[in-house]
Amino acid sequence: MGEMMKKKSRWWRKGICLCLTAGILTGCQDADTKENVKSIRIGVTVYDQYDTFISQLIECFSADLSNKEKETGTVIHIEVCNAADSQTTQNSQVEDMLENGCDVICVNLVDRTEPTTIIDMAEKKNIPIIFFNRELVEEDLKRWDQLYYVGAKAFESGVMQGEVAAEIFQSDESVDKNQDGVFQYVVLEGEAGHQDAIVRTEYAVSTLMEHQVKVEKLGYGIANWNRAQAQTKMTQMLDQHGAEIELVLANNDDMALGAVDALKAAQIAREDWPVIMGIDGTDVGLEAVKQGELAGTVYNDKEGQAFAMLNLAYELATGGELSGLELEDGKYIRLPYAKVEQEDVEQYQNGEKP
């Protein structure tokens, strides 16, 4: 499947959607060449294929296809598109999917505040939409009874990030470098105005304070979930604050790893690094926890979300029963987060989630 994702990346870079059947490349226009074969078509559009978590979630989704086919006897075609961080592009992709006969469409919104065009087009065609990972405004999800969301509760990840950071501060005196009893921190934030980014930061900091940890914010940088941008922002904050920085709260693992890259580029000794916290539990993030470069991360259950999204998409596409899917308010499927530190990271790397 890793090689498959490399092939997918080459297509995505050209802005072309890729069609798959149970993980195998296929032509988009010959969805059902045998008269008596039951088949469905699922469209998927992601905000940015280069987002590590999203890429791994789609890899999980694709890997689950053949099991679903064997279980149901249904041929499942998926069309995966990269919106390349453009809502206009994503709207066009959804329009094409609707015209090409998709039975259900899964949308990882570029702009969570701008789902109107997609919703209106889908409602006109009476095709269900599953939004995932980037949660739209509740009022928008209620606009039509065929709109759903699969993801997690953003505040939980912030709480867990804050809990791990508080535990470290209270158990290891060395992280308070100036011994003033205050955790001086900087934030690497996902996107300006993005709900998940705001909530993750807010709850991480408030949880630290609730655990009786005094904190002082030294600075922050908007890095758009991106490792390279985070390295640039972290380099700027190191130039400004240097050894004053005792904690880095990053809204995702990629940005946490950007902070690591900045520290390495600055040739700062490992023992002088601040505590660095990520969120998502991506493969590279987990490895960084194992190596001690990140103090911890918060596992965002990509396997569970992919499995839930595929099951929901299948039932919607086939007119099946939704009652067994544990939908909250008839709309939401949310998977829980989990704290990951060095002592339990190998369980997650081995797929043995506690």
Image (cartoon, rainbow, N blue to C red):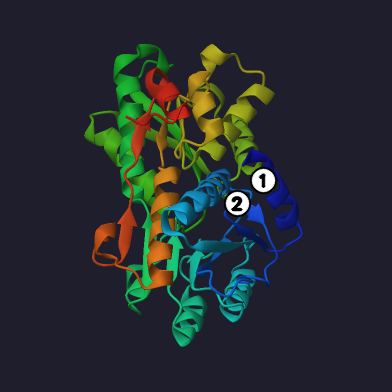
Give the mark, 1 or 2, whose residue is nearer the N terminus: 1
Badges 1 and 2: C-beta atoms under 8 Å apart?
yes
Q: Decide if residue 230 is on the left or right side of residue 131.
A: right
Q: Residue 220: tell me if it is visible.
A: yes
Kindly identify the residue that appears in the image at 34 percent across and 28 percent down. 164
Query: Quick one: quadrant of the C terminus?
Result: top left
Look at mark 2 in the image and give the residue it sits on: 23
Look at mark 1 in the image and give the residue it sits on: 4
- Helix, strand, or loop for circle 1? helix
Q: Quadrant of residue 178?
A: top left
Q: Decide if residue 162 is on the left or right side of residue 284.
A: left
Locate residue 137, reporting x and y percent.
37, 68
Kindly identify the residue that appears in the image at 39 percent across and 58 percent down. 311
Locate residue 100, reporting x and y percent.
61, 77
**Would you call the spot at circle 1 few (<14 residues within 10 Å), some (14-19), or many (20 or more)?**
few
Q: Is residue 115 above or below residue 265?
A: below
